[in-house]
Image (tube, helix red, strand yellow):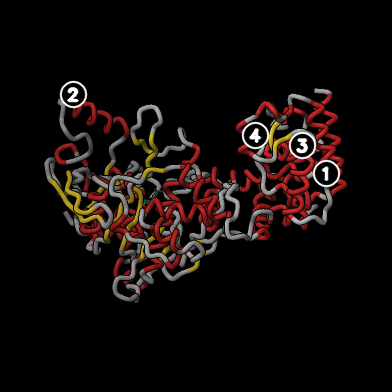
Amino acid sequence: MDYKKLANLLFPNVTETVDALEKKYPKRNLEEGAIVTRFAPSPTGIDVHFGHLFNCFIASTVAHQSNGVYYLRIEDTDQKRKVEGAVETIIKTLNTFNINFDEGRTIDGNDFGNYGPYKQSERKNIYQAVAKMLVENGLAYPCFCKEEDLNKIRSYQKEHKLTHIGYYGEFAKCRNLTYEEIEENIKNGKKWVLRFKCSAKPGDRMSYDDYIKGVIEQDANINDVIIIKEDGLPPYNFAHVCDDHFMRTNMVMRGEEYSGVSTTEHIQLFNACGFEVPRYAHNPYILKLDPETGNAVKLSKSKHREASVSFYLRDGYPVDAVVDYMYLLANSDFEKWREENPTSPVSEYTLKISNLSKSGSVFDIDKLNNISKNRMALKTATQVYEETYAWANEHNKEWAELLNKHKDFAIKMFNIDRETAKPRKDITTYLKTIELYNYFFNEYFYNFNIENFALDESFNNYENVENVLKEYLNSYNENLSHEDWFAKIKEFSSKIGYATDNKEYKKNPEKYLGNVANVCGIIRVAITSQNKTPDLYEICKLLGKEELENRINYFLEILKNK
Ligand code: GLU
């Protein structure tokens, strides 16, 4: 067959050539070892999976560590599954976690970089030029099979228990159409797709050296896969090959779901086009231990809330904590580095691909919470304030309003037990600050009812409680030092029947109403509603004597009427 004639019949209007494209998108001038990689999301949803974020984190980090390029390409050739706003959300989400691109599409739909357009639906001319070249070289052909024809082939293959189900070899009947038949079909307006003429046969094996997983040997693709759909656009496979070639990607980093037979298909396509095959790096799935079976399963949006990046945003995990956690998921020695360098920027740590788990890292929310507490403890009160306020502005208006209205007070509040050698490690998320600190604000405190107060047996006898609190108010003076303040508490405690010496109390508990710890506990709960708080002395100082009195009266009132 005259393939050149066939190519012109199929693509009469395509004047673009592969040679011209090679010149238009020249090889990048980068130093040896520089990695050029990309994030290539399909805009089919607005909730980014944590696995995607993790992949992006790995790819952007290794690209930047190597002085390479990390770019964003929007893979929207599946026009039916396109979701409005998805691109913008993806970019915004990644930027939030400090993942930035050197080239690609921006939120406002513009491109930056010399290898664009960075949106596949705008690259039809490129795909068609390469497709036309494949037809000219006898490596692709039009297929007029309809859904029912394909179903028939599949049923036959299943009935005869063939190991391979698909459009290949003797089943690829459109491979054998003559030029005249093709011309006739086209004249009659028959719809066609373009298929790749695959030379692999059932049983053929292929191997490739995955940058993360090492050498992978496996069955080769044998199907004559579709490379141009009826609408003239390619499916993902062929678009990937053309784009990664002309965008001069040298490392395709992506999720594990593309490893295996898909990759063999992609390599076959690269070879057929005469393009250099990039290195592949498939990131294993993030796993999660199933508490019931103890087995590691894929972190999945339908089962685990941590699988959605929106979870971290909604709950307000500090970005630096999530980033630190991703480093840890990637390289377990990061933990030691972080211990030794608690305040260093992560960019000083070198991420090592060779240390990535080949079978998948196991996600552990407790670990993230722990990292988060440590990161938060290192922040200044003003930082905590600013970050919490920024989060609240988007996720909890009521909290944002209070923080804004009482800004100075809130900074002082966050400063209690902070900016010291041993800062308090209580905040895991900005959301948690509401639960931990709401009582500081009168707007919350005076709406509490008795169920909100963490009462224990110390509160069983109203008179004793009243006694403690009245004595406290009498003894309280805003100018007392921490030591003197505590000495006063001890003084009145002993006067009203509480032990001040714990050893003595342990020996003869029946002689006392309780000990000083119980006294402090009563004061703490009355003033804050909680039994665990930052330093009580500091809280009292911040609230001031008048407010202490109001709070104590309020508490006694509701305790009495309980
Ligand atoms: N568009 C594909 C996806 O969203 C990208 C796969 C790749 O990175 O090669 O999963």
Question: In the figure, is residue 386 to the left or right of 213?
Answer: right
Of residue 553 and residue 331, the one placed in the foreground of this image is 553
Q: Residue shown at 52%/57% (left/top)?
A: 320
Q: From the viewer's perspective, is the residue at label 2 or at label 1 nearer?
A: 1
Tell me how far mark 2 sits from mark 1, CA to CA: 83 Å
Residue type, numbered disc 1: Leu
Q: Is residue 347 above or below residue 530?
A: below
What residue is shown with label 1? 548
Q: Is residue 365 above or below residue 505?
A: below
Ligand 1 closer than 8 Å to the CB at disc 2?
no
Residue type, numbered disc 2: Glu
Q: Pick whichever of labels 1 and 4 is earlier in the sequence.
A: 4
SS at circle 2:
helix
Q: How many marks?
A: 4
Residue type, numbered disc 3: Ala
Question: In the figure, is residue 322 to the left or right of 465?
Answer: left
Mark 2 Cα within 10 Å, few/some/many (few <14, many 20+)?
Answer: few
